[in-house]
Image (spheres, rainbow, N blue to C red):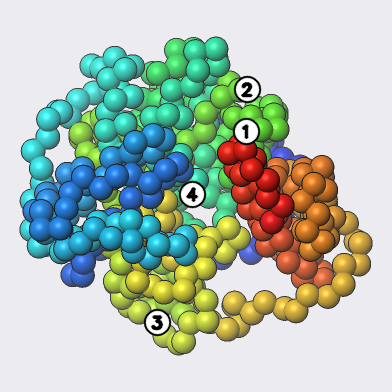
Amino acid sequence: MKKLYSSVLRTFKGGVHPPDEKRHTADIAIQDFMDPKGDMVFPMLQHLGAPCRPVVKKGDFVLRDQVIGEPDGLGALVYSSVSGTVKDVKPMPHPNGSKVMSVVIENDRQYTTMEKDIQPCSYKELSAEQILDRIRRAGIVGMGGAGFPTHIKLSPPPDKKIDHIILNASECEPYLTSDYRVMLEDSWRVVNGLRIVLSLFPGAKGYIAIESNKPDAFQALQPYIEDENDIELVGLKTKYPQGGEKQLIHAVTHREVPSGGLPADIGCIVINVDTSVAISRAITQARPLQRRIVTVTGDCVKNPGNYRVRIGTSFREVLEAAGGVTKEPAKIICGGPMMGMALSSLDVPVIKTSSCLLVFSDSKAYLPEESACIRCGKCIQACPMHLQPYELNQLVLRRDWDGFIKWHGPECIECGSCSYICPAKRHLTQTCKLGRQVVAAMRKQAAKGGKSHG
């Protein structure tokens, strides 16, 4: 038997160690909530890129696994996860806080599935082009949060030689356990998806990178790679944000993604655990992406757990499936507590990138008042991008956007490490996020030939 992993755990410089809070749901098997009663809402934006174009209209009857949104550029197909009648096509609330053009379907709860024009098979029966086409047709995106279309990520320019395929199995955000449960309960598909990706890059090696606080995941995946010479389990120190793409690549390979560059520039591609499962399902079952594993937890949730949910299901129904709340929530977050988005309402749908629903009371959501920076330097030590968050904070407050750029503010990954560690409770991450938004808008305006300084 191959050695499970090296005794030397890999990591990156910086980061923080918040309480992981995974004990609430880590030992709870995935439960099915696949028969929602309410209307299903499918935003045309569930990926990085431009929104899709709806290809159905009000009154149409649609089938499960039918395309209802098509991209005109960078994007991924959107499928219906139910059968039923289109009630409307209109802007609807999105988990990101905006309104996005969406297809609203009245679920008939029959789940009549569209007849497939491709058949399940082994990836070994397909060419690289056919594999990529099936991944594209399945509408798969990065399910770790960014939502980058997977078929594009797996099609780097010919001059980029890919030799490292890294499976991001760290799940470093506190509270989240959906990927962990997938590794335990769907181990074969996790590894098979990685095998499929490796088949696209002859000579590349696969690395399954898992934090040291998940020994059961190592044990679950081990039997499926014992005979694989090109797949290795890599142990990582338990630290946040170990799952950040650049941090993970550095920990595994000691390579640095250049400023403004992509992992492919240094021969790497990173895929998420559940993305790997979706790739496997797209090939071996000819199924598009139409379900999500969601961790539902927080001190207000009656029955915290991990739920298999149809994309398009209302978060309100998901919370009801977890028994509802035991006390009045003060804050609800889609995603993890460090990088998730606060929700103003539960009447928004689960989308491809929805990993978690956090429901906190006042005691957990309490945000202390800011006090003056004491120049302790803890934010600099914690920043995984080696920035100076306290300086960036001041530049944004002064609206000095040129200075923000000069001090590499756009390189911030908004991980929240600086805000977490700051003894003065400065809103460092929030101001960096604002600065990045303003600079992005300035650059977009400049590209159009105008000027804007916010």
Q: Secondary structure at mark 2?
A: helix
- Residue identifier under label 2: 266
What's under tag 2, amino acid-wise? Ile
Marks 2 and 3, the one that precedes in the sequence: 2
Distance CA(mark 2)–CA(mark 3): 47 Å
**Residue 119 x/y as whole percent:** 14, 28
Of the two numbered discs 2 and 3 in the rendering, the one whose residue sits closer to the viewer: 2
Alpha carbon of mark 1 to alpha carbon of mark 4: how far? 17 Å
Taking 87 as reference, is 448 above or below it? above
Quadrant (top left, top right, bottom left, bottom right) of the C terminus: bottom right
How far is disc 1 from disc 2 in space, using C-alphas? Answer: 10 Å
Q: Residue at x 75, y 79 (%)?
A: 369
User: Does the CB distance between marks 1 and 2 fall below 8 Å?
Assistant: yes
Outermost front residue = 450
Judging by the rendered image, the residue that carries numbered circle 1 is 249
Q: Position of residue 43 (x, y in %)?
A: 33, 55
* Image vertical order of residue 443 relative to residue 21, above or below: above
Residue 77 on image: x %, y %? 30, 40
- Side (left or right) of 53 relative to 167: left
- The image quarter in which residue 138 lies: top left
**Front disc: 1 or 2:** 2
Q: CA distance from mark 3 to mark 4?
A: 26 Å
What amino acid is labelled 1 in the image? Answer: Ile
Q: Position of residue 325 (x, y in %)?
A: 40, 82
214 versus 349 height, above or below:
above
Mark 2 or 4, nearer chain start = 4
- Residue position for label 4: 145
Which mark, residue 325? 3
